[in-house]
Image: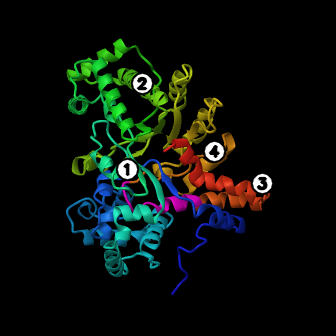
Amino acid sequence: MGKVFIHDDFLLETKAGRRLYHEFAVGEPIFDYHTHLPPADVARNRQFANIAEIWLEGDHYKWRGMRANGIEERLITGDAPPKEKFRAWAATVPQTLRNPLYHWTHLELKRYFDIDTLLSEETAEAIWEETEEKLASPELSAQGILKKFNVAMVGTTDDPTDDLAHHQTIAGLGISTKVLPTYRPDNALNVHRPELFNPWVEKLAASAGMEIANYADFVAALRKRHDFFHEQGCRVSDHGLDRAYGDFCLDAEAEAIFGAARLGKAADEAHYGMFVSNLMRLFGQWNAERGWVMQLHLGPLRNNSTRLMAKVGADAGCDSMGDVPQALGLSRFLDGLDVDDQLPRTVVYNLNPADNYVVAAMVANFQDGTLAGKLQYGSGWWFLDQKEGMEWQLNALSNLGLLSRFVGMLTDSRSFMSYPRHEYFRRVLCNLIGRDVEKGEIPDEDALVGPMIRNICYGNAARYFGV
């Protein structure tokens, strides 16, 4: 048998890095403040039938790899039996060398199932059988996984129209992990897509228990749902945008744009930007008033493949990095709140690495001395949540801000198999800092460096999000 691939010092190149990881990082709880985990799975304590169910459902990272490997869609998102889909993934894995999928796959096999065997077509059958048996254990139910990985908090992603019934069920279970909703009002911005916007407005009206006849009603309904989310323990909003918008308009102009959309007239680019700016400012004000954190996920170019969209639908794995300018809009948006002392704690993530230094510099402009790290440059996101992307983000933050105040990593995942992503980040972090220590660029003083590592892994996030 060859050398075990996922060993204790995986990714840790130096003695200092190994010491920092094993003494200060590995034992910290996980504060997973942004995910797409289904709260229904936690509420009913879902027991997964097989590894295809827990591993391949909704994982567009794997789907993209499989398509690139020439796997037909029937074996990816289609109606093929789960075991056939798993075999297709197993056949793909050896072709993913140097893609983070290779690391993640084997970390997950090791941490969930204690399997050291490399996944391939030849090993697929044995791994299928071993994982199927272990998945039947309570330890690998949805709630069991949260306990196994010492997850202190999970933030889900929830539409304002959601009744949050699953969160209410979870709150009554007495489990050790807090599972809290996140207010994600992206559907409220779709005035450029009336065919999507208008049915959603009706859904909002029903959830808020009120008629929506005009823009003022629309805002009141959104605020009513914001209040409801707060009552259910929500302390975070999240916003997925191609860019930040700072083209603020009067309510009368927003009313005209809203009214046109309700009549089926799509907003043009300029009016869309005005409407989004106006609503986003309101969300920021409400968050500041309530003491919430606001997350801005900036930069995706979504649904590029018309063919895949028609066949699979949204979140099919055909999204990409956008390349729109970010600096001016982000500056105007943050300043529009800051000037009136209404800027909440804010985390800004960018998807295009060309914007790393733009975002890291911009958030530093609006630190106000009221809270350490009030404005955060968010972790490497989506296409950047891999070793190189993480290092780029950590370096930009270190050079232009305070790494010591960073709130650290999150899974941003739909899969309960993603918790080793936190381990992966912690290894990358300790390896990076360990190299600096051994080069003499950081003092070789555990009393100085160790607490920083612990705080980035858990403590900073727990304090920042305050839940």
Q: Disc 3 on helix, strand or loop?
A: loop
The residue singled out by tag 3 in the image is 441
Residue 263, quarter of the rendered image: top left
Lower position in the chain sequence, tag 1 or tag 2: 1
The answer to whether any part of residue 391 appears in the image is no
Lower position in the chain sequence, tag 4 or tag 1: 1
The residue singled out by tag 1 in the image is 36
Query: In the image, residue 5 lies at what x, y percent?
Result: 53, 75
Task: Tell me how the rendering is colored.
Answer: rainbow
What amino acid type is highlighted by mark number 2? Leu
C-alpha span from label 4 to label 3: 19 Å
Residue 22, quarter of the rendered image: bottom right
Q: Disc 4 on helix, strand or loop?
A: helix
Query: Between residues 340 and 87, which one lies in front from this camera angle?
Result: 340
x 30%, y 67%: residue:
52
Q: Disc 1 on helix, strand or loop?
A: loop
Query: In the image, residue 395 lies at what x, y percent?
Result: 64, 48
Query: In the image, residue 318 lies at what x, y percent?
Result: 35, 49
**453 in magenta:** no
The residue singled out by tag 4 in the image is 405
Check if mark 2's residue and mark 4's residue have beta carbons within 8 Å: no
Left or right: 299 as drawn, with respect to 210? right
**419 in magenta:** yes
The residue singled out by tag 2 in the image is 282
What amino acid type is highlighted by mark number 4? Arg
C-alpha span from label 4 to label 1: 25 Å
